[in-house]
Protein backbone atom coordinates (compact mmCIF):
# COMPACT_ATOMS: atom_id res chain seq x y z
CA UNK A 1 0.00 0.00 0.00
CA UNK A 2 1.46 3.33 -1.02
CA UNK A 3 0.46 6.79 -2.13
CA UNK A 4 1.99 6.92 -5.61
CA UNK A 5 -1.04 6.77 -7.89
CA UNK A 6 -2.35 8.09 -11.18
CA UNK A 7 -4.65 11.06 -10.81
CA UNK A 8 -6.10 12.61 -13.98
CA UNK A 9 -3.75 10.57 -16.13
CA UNK A 10 -0.52 11.56 -14.36
CA UNK A 11 1.46 9.81 -11.64
CA UNK A 12 1.33 11.68 -8.35
CA UNK A 13 3.00 11.40 -4.98
CA UNK A 14 0.00 11.93 -2.71
CA UNK A 15 -1.58 15.07 -4.23
CA UNK A 16 1.54 16.37 -5.99
CA UNK A 17 2.13 15.61 -9.69
CA UNK A 18 5.62 14.16 -10.14
CA UNK A 19 5.91 16.27 -13.26
CA UNK A 20 5.73 19.41 -11.14
CA UNK A 21 8.56 18.25 -8.90
CA UNK A 22 10.61 17.18 -11.92
CA UNK A 23 10.18 20.61 -13.46
CA UNK A 24 11.26 22.41 -10.31
CA UNK A 25 13.91 20.07 -8.92
CA UNK A 26 15.18 18.44 -12.12
CA UNK A 27 15.72 14.71 -12.61
CA UNK A 28 16.62 12.23 -11.31
CA UNK A 29 15.33 12.51 -7.74
CA UNK A 30 14.07 10.34 -4.91
CA UNK A 31 10.55 11.11 -3.80
CA UNK A 32 9.08 9.95 -0.48
CA UNK A 33 5.48 9.99 0.68
CA UNK A 34 4.84 11.10 4.24
CA UNK A 35 1.43 9.36 4.38
CA UNK A 36 3.01 6.08 3.29
CA UNK A 37 5.81 6.35 5.83
CA UNK A 38 3.32 7.04 8.60
CA UNK A 39 1.01 4.28 7.48
CA UNK A 40 3.72 1.63 7.36
CA UNK A 41 5.06 2.58 10.76
CA UNK A 42 1.57 2.61 12.26
CA UNK A 43 0.52 -0.73 10.76
CA UNK A 44 3.65 -2.37 12.13
CA UNK A 45 3.38 -0.71 15.52
CA UNK A 46 -0.32 -1.56 15.82
CA UNK A 47 0.39 -5.23 15.17
CA UNK A 48 1.99 -5.24 18.63
CA UNK A 49 -0.39 -2.89 20.41
CA UNK A 50 -1.18 -5.47 23.08
CA UNK A 51 2.42 -6.16 24.03
CA UNK A 52 5.14 -4.11 25.62
CA UNK A 53 7.35 -3.22 22.67
CA UNK A 54 9.59 -0.66 20.99
CA UNK A 55 9.98 -0.28 17.23
CA UNK A 56 13.57 0.74 16.53
CA UNK A 57 13.55 1.72 12.86
CA UNK A 58 16.74 0.49 11.14
CA UNK A 59 18.18 3.80 10.04
CA UNK A 60 20.39 2.14 7.45
CA UNK A 61 17.38 1.73 5.16
CA UNK A 62 16.89 5.48 4.77
CA UNK A 63 18.68 7.84 7.07
CA UNK A 64 17.51 11.24 5.92
CA UNK A 65 16.94 13.51 8.92
CA UNK A 66 13.40 14.26 7.76
CA UNK A 67 12.57 10.55 7.62
CA UNK A 68 14.07 9.91 11.05
CA UNK A 69 12.20 12.88 12.53
CA UNK A 70 8.92 11.77 10.95
CA UNK A 71 9.23 8.32 12.49
CA UNK A 72 10.53 9.58 15.83
CA UNK A 73 7.51 11.86 16.08
CA UNK A 74 5.33 8.73 15.87
CA UNK A 75 7.22 7.23 18.79
CA UNK A 76 9.86 5.19 16.95
CA UNK A 77 13.24 4.39 18.40
CA UNK A 78 16.19 3.71 16.11
CA UNK A 79 18.54 0.85 15.34
CA UNK A 80 21.95 2.22 14.39
CA UNK A 81 25.04 0.43 13.09
CA UNK A 82 27.68 3.14 13.13
CA UNK A 83 28.66 6.28 14.95
CA UNK A 84 27.43 8.19 11.91
CA UNK A 85 23.96 6.71 12.24
CA UNK A 86 24.04 7.39 15.98
CA UNK A 87 24.79 11.04 15.26
CA UNK A 88 21.93 11.12 12.76
CA UNK A 89 19.51 9.73 15.34
CA UNK A 90 20.65 12.10 18.08
CA UNK A 91 20.61 15.08 15.75
CA UNK A 92 17.01 14.28 14.80
CA UNK A 93 16.14 14.40 18.50
CA UNK A 94 15.66 10.68 19.11
CA UNK A 95 15.64 9.75 22.80
CA UNK A 96 18.93 7.86 23.43
CA UNK A 97 16.97 5.42 25.58
CA UNK A 98 15.25 4.32 22.36
CA UNK A 99 18.48 3.60 20.46
CA UNK A 100 20.03 0.16 19.90
CA UNK A 101 23.50 -0.19 18.42
CA UNK A 102 23.99 -3.27 16.21
CA UNK A 103 26.86 -4.42 13.99
CA UNK A 104 29.87 -6.76 14.08
CA UNK A 105 32.57 -4.12 14.03
CA UNK A 106 31.92 -1.36 16.53
CA UNK A 107 35.12 0.54 17.27
CA UNK A 108 36.10 1.58 20.78
CA UNK A 109 35.53 5.18 19.90
CA UNK A 110 32.03 4.37 18.63
CA UNK A 111 31.36 2.50 21.87
CA UNK A 112 32.51 5.49 23.91
CA UNK A 113 30.26 7.90 21.99
CA UNK A 114 27.26 5.61 22.44
CA UNK A 115 27.99 5.13 26.14
CA UNK A 116 28.28 8.88 26.66
CA UNK A 117 24.97 9.36 24.84
CA UNK A 118 23.34 6.78 27.14
CA UNK A 119 21.80 4.46 24.56
CA UNK A 120 19.33 1.69 25.45
CA UNK A 121 21.34 -1.29 24.27
CA UNK A 122 24.45 -2.57 22.52
CA UNK A 123 23.73 -5.63 20.42
CA UNK A 124 27.05 -7.41 20.90
CA UNK A 125 28.18 -9.85 18.23
CA UNK A 126 31.36 -11.51 19.52
CA UNK A 127 33.51 -12.18 22.58
CA UNK A 128 36.30 -9.77 21.58
CA UNK A 129 33.65 -7.06 21.16
CA UNK A 130 32.38 -7.85 24.65
CA UNK A 131 35.90 -7.46 26.07
CA UNK A 132 36.39 -4.17 24.24
CA UNK A 133 33.04 -2.82 25.44
CA UNK A 134 33.84 -3.81 29.02
CA UNK A 135 37.17 -1.99 28.77
CA UNK A 136 35.62 1.18 27.31
CA UNK A 137 32.66 1.20 29.73
CA UNK A 138 34.92 0.68 32.76
CA UNK A 139 37.28 3.43 31.70
CA UNK A 140 34.31 5.81 31.47
CA UNK A 141 32.81 4.52 34.69
CA UNK A 142 29.66 3.51 32.84
CA UNK A 143 27.67 0.32 32.48
CA UNK A 144 26.73 -0.89 29.03
CA UNK A 145 23.34 -2.57 28.80
CA UNK A 146 23.78 -5.31 26.28
CA UNK A 147 21.98 -7.97 24.31
CA UNK A 148 24.03 -10.66 22.63
CA UNK A 149 23.13 -11.47 19.05
CA UNK A 150 22.53 -15.16 18.55
CA UNK A 151 23.03 -16.73 15.17
CA UNK A 152 20.26 -19.36 15.04
CA UNK A 153 21.59 -21.03 11.88
CA UNK A 154 18.31 -20.77 10.00
CA UNK A 155 17.94 -20.18 6.30
CA UNK A 156 15.89 -17.01 5.80
CA UNK A 157 15.29 -18.00 2.15
CA UNK A 158 16.26 -14.63 0.83
CA UNK A 159 19.05 -13.33 -1.41
CA UNK A 160 22.44 -14.69 -0.27
CA UNK A 161 23.88 -11.20 0.20
CA UNK A 162 21.20 -10.22 2.72
CA UNK A 163 20.85 -13.48 4.61
CA UNK A 164 22.39 -13.13 8.08
CA UNK A 165 21.23 -16.02 10.25
CA UNK A 166 23.18 -18.94 8.81
CA UNK A 167 26.16 -20.41 10.63
CA UNK A 168 28.46 -19.37 7.80
CA UNK A 169 27.43 -15.70 8.07
CA UNK A 170 29.60 -13.29 10.05
CA UNK A 171 26.79 -12.32 12.43
CA UNK A 172 26.16 -13.22 16.06
CA UNK A 173 27.41 -16.04 18.23
CA UNK A 174 26.41 -19.70 17.86
CA UNK A 175 23.42 -20.76 19.93
CA UNK A 176 25.48 -23.57 21.45
CA UNK A 177 27.87 -21.06 23.05
CA UNK A 178 25.25 -18.71 24.46
CA UNK A 179 25.29 -20.09 28.01
CA UNK A 180 29.03 -19.76 28.36
CA UNK A 181 29.26 -16.31 26.73
CA UNK A 182 26.40 -14.84 28.79
CA UNK A 183 28.08 -16.16 31.96
CA UNK A 184 31.30 -14.48 30.89
CA UNK A 185 29.47 -11.25 30.02
CA UNK A 186 27.83 -11.16 33.45
CA UNK A 187 31.25 -11.43 35.07
CA UNK A 188 32.71 -8.49 33.14
CA UNK A 189 33.05 -5.05 34.63
CA UNK A 190 30.85 -2.43 33.00
CA UNK A 191 28.58 -4.96 31.27
CA UNK A 192 24.97 -5.67 32.12
CA UNK A 193 23.37 -8.38 29.98
CA UNK A 194 19.68 -7.52 29.87
CA UNK A 195 18.63 -8.80 26.47
CA UNK A 196 18.92 -11.20 23.59
CA UNK A 197 19.06 -10.29 19.91
CA UNK A 198 18.47 -12.03 16.60
CA UNK A 199 18.23 -10.73 13.04
CA UNK A 200 18.16 -13.43 10.39
CA UNK A 201 18.11 -11.43 7.16
CA UNK A 202 16.25 -8.98 5.00
CA UNK A 203 13.36 -9.14 2.49
CA UNK A 204 12.03 -12.30 4.12
CA UNK A 205 8.70 -13.29 2.60
CA UNK A 206 8.12 -16.64 4.29
CA UNK A 207 7.23 -16.71 7.99
CA UNK A 208 8.71 -20.18 8.60
CA UNK A 209 12.32 -19.03 9.12
CA UNK A 210 11.10 -16.42 11.61
CA UNK A 211 9.07 -19.07 13.38
CA UNK A 212 12.07 -21.39 13.63
CA UNK A 213 14.33 -18.61 14.89
CA UNK A 214 11.84 -17.28 17.42
CA UNK A 215 11.14 -20.73 18.85
CA UNK A 216 14.84 -21.05 19.45
CA UNK A 217 14.70 -17.62 21.06
CA UNK A 218 12.15 -18.99 23.54
CA UNK A 219 14.47 -21.83 24.49
CA UNK A 220 17.34 -19.43 24.83
CA UNK A 221 15.57 -16.95 27.11
CA UNK A 222 14.21 -19.75 29.28
CA UNK A 223 17.69 -21.22 29.62
CA UNK A 224 19.35 -17.85 30.35
CA UNK A 225 16.78 -16.98 32.98
CA UNK A 226 17.30 -20.39 34.60
CA UNK A 227 21.00 -19.52 34.69
CA UNK A 228 20.12 -16.41 36.69
CA UNK A 229 20.29 -13.73 33.98
CA UNK A 230 17.68 -11.01 34.20
CA UNK A 231 16.56 -10.97 30.57
CA UNK A 232 14.08 -8.12 30.20
CA UNK A 233 14.46 -7.28 26.48
CA UNK A 234 14.05 -9.50 23.44
CA UNK A 235 15.19 -7.90 20.18
CA UNK A 236 13.77 -9.77 17.20
CA UNK A 237 15.56 -7.72 14.52
CA UNK A 238 13.93 -6.68 11.26
CA UNK A 239 13.69 -8.42 7.94
CA UNK A 240 10.00 -8.64 7.08
CA UNK A 241 9.74 -8.29 3.30
CA UNK A 242 7.76 -5.83 1.19
CA UNK A 243 6.02 -6.30 -2.17
CA UNK A 244 8.24 -5.40 -5.13
CA UNK A 245 6.69 -7.36 -7.98
CA UNK A 246 3.21 -6.37 -9.08
CA UNK A 247 2.25 -9.96 -9.97
CA UNK A 248 3.85 -11.81 -7.05
CA UNK A 249 1.82 -12.93 -4.02
CA UNK A 250 2.04 -10.26 -1.30
CA UNK A 251 4.46 -10.91 1.56
CA UNK A 252 3.00 -11.66 5.00
CA UNK A 253 1.20 -8.80 6.75
CA UNK A 254 2.73 -7.53 10.01
CA UNK A 255 -0.33 -8.94 11.82
CA UNK A 256 0.63 -12.46 10.66
CA UNK A 257 4.21 -11.86 11.71
CA UNK A 258 2.87 -10.73 15.11
CA UNK A 259 0.89 -13.98 15.44
CA UNK A 260 4.03 -16.05 14.84
CA UNK A 261 5.74 -14.08 17.58
CA UNK A 262 2.84 -14.38 19.99
CA UNK A 263 2.85 -18.15 19.49
CA UNK A 264 6.61 -18.53 19.76
CA UNK A 265 7.47 -16.24 22.68
CA UNK A 266 4.19 -14.70 23.87
CA UNK A 267 4.50 -16.25 27.32
CA UNK A 268 7.89 -14.66 28.04
CA UNK A 269 7.38 -11.53 30.04
CA UNK A 270 9.72 -9.08 28.30
CA UNK A 271 9.88 -5.88 26.26
CA UNK A 272 10.01 -6.78 22.58
CA UNK A 273 12.23 -4.72 20.31
CA UNK A 274 11.85 -4.72 16.53
CA UNK A 275 14.23 -3.31 13.94
CA UNK A 276 12.25 -2.99 10.71
CA UNK A 277 13.87 -0.94 7.99
CA UNK A 278 12.58 -1.82 4.54
CA UNK A 279 9.05 -2.42 5.77
CA UNK A 280 8.79 1.19 6.89
CA UNK A 281 10.47 3.04 4.03
CA UNK A 282 10.66 0.60 1.09
CA UNK A 283 7.36 1.36 -0.60
CA UNK A 284 7.30 4.92 0.71
CA UNK A 285 9.84 6.04 -1.87
CA UNK A 286 10.33 6.09 -5.63
CA UNK A 287 13.10 7.14 -7.96
CA UNK A 288 11.94 9.50 -10.68
CA UNK A 289 14.00 9.61 -13.81
CA UNK A 290 13.88 10.97 -17.34
CA UNK A 291 14.31 9.04 -20.56
CA UNK A 292 17.39 10.12 -22.46
CA UNK A 293 17.18 7.81 -25.46
CA UNK A 294 15.42 4.71 -26.68
CA UNK A 295 18.18 2.82 -28.41
CA UNK A 296 17.59 -0.11 -30.71
CA UNK A 297 20.41 -2.56 -30.11
CA UNK A 298 21.30 -5.54 -32.29
CA UNK A 299 19.92 -8.04 -29.79
CA UNK A 300 17.48 -5.93 -27.80
CA UNK A 301 16.28 -2.43 -27.05
CA UNK A 302 17.67 -0.21 -24.34
CA UNK A 303 15.79 2.51 -22.58
CA UNK A 304 18.60 4.83 -21.51
CA UNK A 305 17.56 7.00 -18.58
CA UNK A 306 19.26 9.67 -16.51
CA UNK A 307 19.56 7.60 -13.33
CA UNK A 308 21.93 4.72 -12.98
CA UNK A 309 23.45 2.04 -10.77
CA UNK A 310 25.14 4.72 -8.69
CA UNK A 311 21.71 6.10 -7.77
CA UNK A 312 20.02 2.74 -7.15
CA UNK A 313 22.35 -0.23 -6.92
CA UNK A 314 19.79 -2.84 -5.84
CA UNK A 315 19.01 -4.32 -9.28
CA UNK A 316 22.62 -5.07 -10.10
CA UNK A 317 23.82 -5.92 -6.59
CA UNK A 318 20.94 -8.10 -5.40
CA UNK A 319 19.24 -8.92 -8.71
CA UNK A 320 16.35 -6.93 -7.27
CA UNK A 321 13.16 -6.26 -9.18
CA UNK A 322 11.69 -2.76 -9.07
CA UNK A 323 8.45 -2.01 -10.87
CA UNK A 324 8.77 0.77 -13.46
CA UNK A 325 5.85 3.01 -14.43
CA UNK A 326 5.58 5.80 -16.95
CA UNK A 327 4.54 9.07 -15.30
CA UNK A 328 2.05 9.65 -18.12
CA UNK A 329 -0.68 7.05 -17.57
CA UNK A 330 -1.78 6.85 -21.22
CA UNK A 331 1.58 5.32 -22.10
CA UNK A 332 0.48 2.16 -20.29
CA UNK A 333 -1.97 1.59 -23.16
CA UNK A 334 0.79 1.48 -25.81
CA UNK A 335 1.93 -1.95 -27.00
CA UNK A 336 4.75 -3.00 -24.69
CA UNK A 337 8.16 -4.20 -25.82
CA UNK A 338 10.88 -6.11 -24.04
CA UNK A 339 13.82 -3.89 -23.14
CA UNK A 340 16.58 -3.21 -20.64
CA UNK A 341 16.35 -0.02 -18.64
CA UNK A 342 19.88 1.25 -18.27
CA UNK A 343 21.77 4.31 -17.07
CA UNK A 344 24.69 6.26 -18.49
CA UNK A 345 27.34 4.52 -16.33
CA UNK A 346 30.03 2.74 -18.30
CA UNK A 347 29.43 -0.82 -17.15
CA UNK A 348 27.19 -3.57 -18.41
CA UNK A 349 26.09 -4.03 -14.79
CA UNK A 350 24.48 -0.60 -14.96
CA UNK A 351 20.81 -1.43 -15.27
CA UNK A 352 17.63 -0.77 -13.34
CA UNK A 353 15.65 -3.48 -15.11
CA UNK A 354 16.50 -6.26 -17.52
CA UNK A 355 14.19 -7.78 -20.10
CA UNK A 356 11.27 -5.71 -18.90
CA UNK A 357 8.06 -5.24 -20.89
CA UNK A 358 7.53 -1.50 -21.12
CA UNK A 359 5.79 0.95 -23.43
CA UNK A 360 8.09 2.61 -25.95
CA UNK A 361 8.86 5.80 -24.06
CA UNK A 362 10.61 8.67 -25.76
CA UNK A 363 13.31 11.18 -24.88
CA UNK A 364 12.21 13.48 -22.03
CA UNK A 365 9.42 11.16 -20.87
CA UNK A 366 9.38 10.66 -17.11
CA UNK A 367 9.27 7.30 -15.40
CA UNK A 368 9.15 6.12 -11.81
CA UNK A 369 11.12 3.25 -10.34
CA UNK A 370 8.95 2.05 -7.46
CA UNK A 371 9.78 0.67 -4.00
CA UNK A 372 13.04 2.58 -3.86
CA UNK A 373 12.59 4.19 -0.45
CA UNK A 374 14.74 1.65 1.40
CA UNK A 375 18.39 1.02 0.52
CA UNK A 376 18.12 3.43 -2.39
CA UNK A 377 19.49 6.88 -1.59
CA UNK A 378 21.61 5.53 1.29
CA UNK A 379 23.50 3.19 -1.02
CA UNK A 380 24.02 5.75 -3.75
CA UNK A 381 27.47 6.95 -4.68
CA UNK A 382 29.18 9.31 -7.06
CA UNK A 383 30.72 6.74 -9.43
CA UNK A 384 31.48 8.23 -12.85
CA UNK A 385 31.48 11.60 -11.01
CA UNK A 386 27.73 11.63 -11.03
CA UNK A 387 26.21 13.89 -8.41
CA UNK A 388 24.21 12.55 -5.48
CA UNK A 389 20.60 13.21 -6.38
CA UNK A 390 18.00 15.15 -4.40
CA UNK A 391 15.52 13.65 -2.00
CA UNK A 392 12.04 15.15 -1.84
CA UNK A 393 9.37 14.55 0.78
CA UNK A 394 5.71 14.99 -0.13
CA UNK A 395 2.94 15.59 2.38
CA UNK A 396 -0.53 16.03 0.91
CA UNK A 397 -0.29 18.78 -1.68
CA UNK A 398 3.06 20.08 -0.38
CA UNK A 399 6.55 18.94 -1.10
CA UNK A 400 9.95 19.91 0.15
CA UNK A 401 13.50 19.09 -0.83
CA UNK A 402 15.00 17.21 2.11
CA UNK A 403 18.41 16.82 0.47
CA UNK A 404 19.45 19.09 -2.37
CA UNK A 405 21.28 17.90 -5.42
CA UNK A 406 25.03 17.91 -4.84
CA UNK A 407 27.00 20.39 -6.91
CA UNK A 408 30.15 19.66 -8.89
CA UNK A 409 32.04 21.98 -6.57
CA UNK A 410 30.76 20.09 -3.48
CA UNK A 411 32.03 16.91 -4.99
CA UNK A 412 35.29 17.84 -6.68
CA UNK A 413 36.50 20.30 -4.06
CA UNK A 414 36.77 17.46 -1.56
CA UNK A 415 39.89 16.30 -3.38
CA UNK A 416 43.13 17.88 -2.21
CA UNK A 417 46.21 18.59 -4.27
CA UNK A 418 49.56 17.55 -2.73
CA UNK A 419 52.24 20.27 -2.30
CA UNK A 420 54.35 18.89 -5.08
CA UNK A 421 51.58 19.47 -7.63
CA UNK A 422 50.35 22.82 -6.37
N1 LIG B 1 18.61 -5.01 12.03
C1 LIG B 1 19.84 -5.36 11.63
C2 LIG B 1 20.82 -5.77 12.62
C3 LIG B 1 20.14 -5.35 10.26
O1 LIG B 1 21.35 -5.71 9.86
C4 LIG B 1 19.17 -4.94 9.33
C5 LIG B 1 19.45 -4.89 7.90
C6 LIG B 1 17.90 -4.55 9.80
C7 LIG B 1 17.66 -4.61 11.16
C8 LIG B 1 16.79 -4.09 8.89
O2 LIG B 1 16.39 -5.07 8.02
P1 LIG B 1 15.09 -4.84 7.09
O3 LIG B 1 13.91 -4.74 8.00
O4 LIG B 1 15.30 -3.59 6.34
O5 LIG B 1 15.04 -6.02 6.21
N2 LIG B 1 20.85 -3.34 1.22
C9 LIG B 1 20.06 -4.54 1.21
C10 LIG B 1 19.49 -4.86 2.56
C11 LIG B 1 20.52 -4.97 3.65
C12 LIG B 1 19.96 -5.24 5.01
C13 LIG B 1 21.03 -5.09 6.03
N3 LIG B 1 20.58 -5.25 7.39
C14 LIG B 1 18.97 -4.42 0.14
O6 LIG B 1 18.87 -3.39 -0.52
O7 LIG B 1 18.22 -5.37 -0.06
Image (cartoon, grey):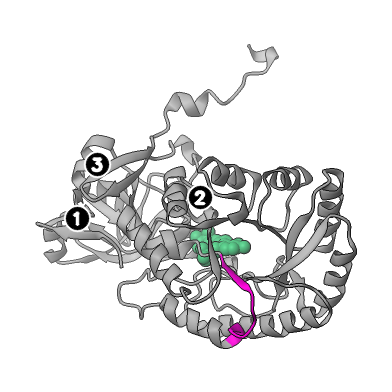
Query: Do residues under tags 2 and 1 come within 8 Å of each other at their CB atoms?
Result: no
Q: Quadrant of residue 266?
A: bottom right
- Dot 2, how many residues are within 10 Å of its Cα: few (below 14), some (14-19), or many (20+)? some
In the displayed structure image, the side of residue 84 where residue 257 appears, left or right: left
Q: Position of residue 148 (x, y in %)?
A: 74, 67
Q: Is residue 404 magenta?
A: no
Residue span colored magenta: 264-274
Vertical placement of residue 275 versus 154, above or below? above
Residue at (43%, 62%) from the top-left corner?
280
Vertical placement of residue 88 versus 324, above or below? above
Query: Do residues under tags 3 and 1 come within 8 Å of each other at their CB atoms?
Result: no
Residue at (26%, 60%) from the top-left corner?
3
Tag 3's secondary structure?
Answer: helix
Tag 2's secondary structure?
Answer: helix
Q: CA distance from mark 2 to mark 1?
A: 25 Å
Q: Position of residue 402 (x, y in %)?
A: 38, 40
Q: Ligand 1 near label 2 (Cβ, under 8 Å)?
A: yes
Determine which residue is flagged by label 1.
Answer: 11
Q: Quadrant of residue 154?
A: bottom right
Residue situated in front as seen by the camera: 189 or 159: 189
Q: Is residue 190 visible?
A: yes
Q: Position of residue 348 (x, y in %)?
A: 45, 53
Determine which residue is flagged by label 3.
Answer: 22
Residue situated in front as seen by the camera: 130 or 52: 52
Q: CA distance from mark 2 to mark 3?
A: 22 Å
| Number of on-image labels | 3
Q: Is residue 309 visible?
A: no
Residue placed furthest toward the bottom = 263
Q: Position of residue 240 (x, y in %)?
A: 49, 72
Residue 379 got which mark?
Answer: 2
Q: CA distance from mark 3 to mark 1?
A: 12 Å
Amino acid sequence: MHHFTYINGALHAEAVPLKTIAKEVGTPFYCYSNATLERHYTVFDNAFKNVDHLVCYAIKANSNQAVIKTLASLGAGMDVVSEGELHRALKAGVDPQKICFSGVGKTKSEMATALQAGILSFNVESEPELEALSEVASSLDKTASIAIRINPDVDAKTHAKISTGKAENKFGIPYARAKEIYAHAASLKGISPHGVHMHIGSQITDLTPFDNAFRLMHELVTMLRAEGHNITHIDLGGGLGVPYEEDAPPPPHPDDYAKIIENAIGDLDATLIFEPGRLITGNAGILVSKVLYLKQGAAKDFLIIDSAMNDLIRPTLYEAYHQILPVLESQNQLPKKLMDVVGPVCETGDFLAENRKLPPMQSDDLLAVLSAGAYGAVQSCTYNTRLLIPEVLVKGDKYTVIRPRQSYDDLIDQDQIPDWLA
